[in-house]
Amino acid sequence: MIKYELICKSCKKSFSSWFASSKEYEKLKKMKLLNCNYCNSLRVTKSLMAPNILNINENIENKKNKEEKKLSYFRKEIKKYQKFIKNNLEYVGKNFAYEARSIHYNSKKKTKGIYGKATKEEMKELRDEGIETHTIPWVEDKDN
């Protein structure tokens, strides 16, 4: 679809009209099916039109705002998970790999789940030993 601004040569008024294509406009013009909305004259022509230019800076700003909203949403969701983890699991800090092995290999040891810090290498070793672990992103409480 294309929108043209049309001008009547008889009454000098302008009005807008939509067409399927520029060829469709030409076809209707040749068939004398275009008439003025005000005086019904067939002396209707297209006026010069300014192109619809996108404001690149505005588009970039809109994109940034959308990305910031998404980031804010994910931050809130991560914080919900963190709150659940803090309330339901035991924090073992950098001893995570040791504690995970201790729980895994000592079936008599009853403990609630744990969370803490481990290197990528420690995590790989734990998985190789058949110890189920998960990595989650962690957002600091202080917003930067």
Image (cartoon, rainbow, N blue to C red):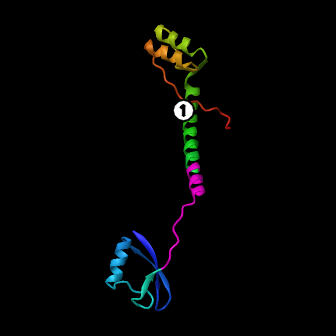
* Nearer to the camera, 80 or 20: 20
Q: Residues within 10 Å of mark 1 (few under 14, many from 20)?
A: some
Compared to residue 52, the image places residue 91 above or below, namely above
Residue 68, image x, y percentages: 59, 46
Residue 98, image x, y percentages: 55, 11
Residue 30, image x, y percentages: 33, 82
Instruction: Find numbered disc 1 in the image and state the secondary structure of the residue it sits on.
Output: helix
Compared to residue 27, the image places residue 36 above or below, namely below
Compared to residue 130, the image places residue 45 above or below, namely below
Question: Which residue is at a point 50% across and 89% down the rendered structure image?
Answer: 12
Residue that label 1 marks? 81
Residue 66, image x, y percentages: 55, 49
Q: Residue furthest left?
A: 31
Question: Which residue is at a point 35% across and 73% down the rendered structure image?
Answer: 23
Query: Where does the magenta region start and end?
Result: 47-64
Q: Quadrant of residue 97?
A: top right
**Magenta residue check for 54:** yes
**Magenta residue check for 132:** no
Q: Amino acid at mark 1?
A: Tyr
Question: Which residue is at a point 58% across and 35% down the rendered structure image?
Answer: 79
Number of numbered discs overlaid on the protein picture: 1
Question: Which residue is at a point 58% across and 49% down the rendered structure image?
Answer: 64
Compared to residue 74, the image places residue 25 above or below, namely below
* Nearer to the camera, 43 or 36: 43
Please identify the quadrant where the C terminus is shown: top right
Q: Quadrant of residue 90?
A: top right
Please identify the quadrant where the N terminus is shown: bottom left
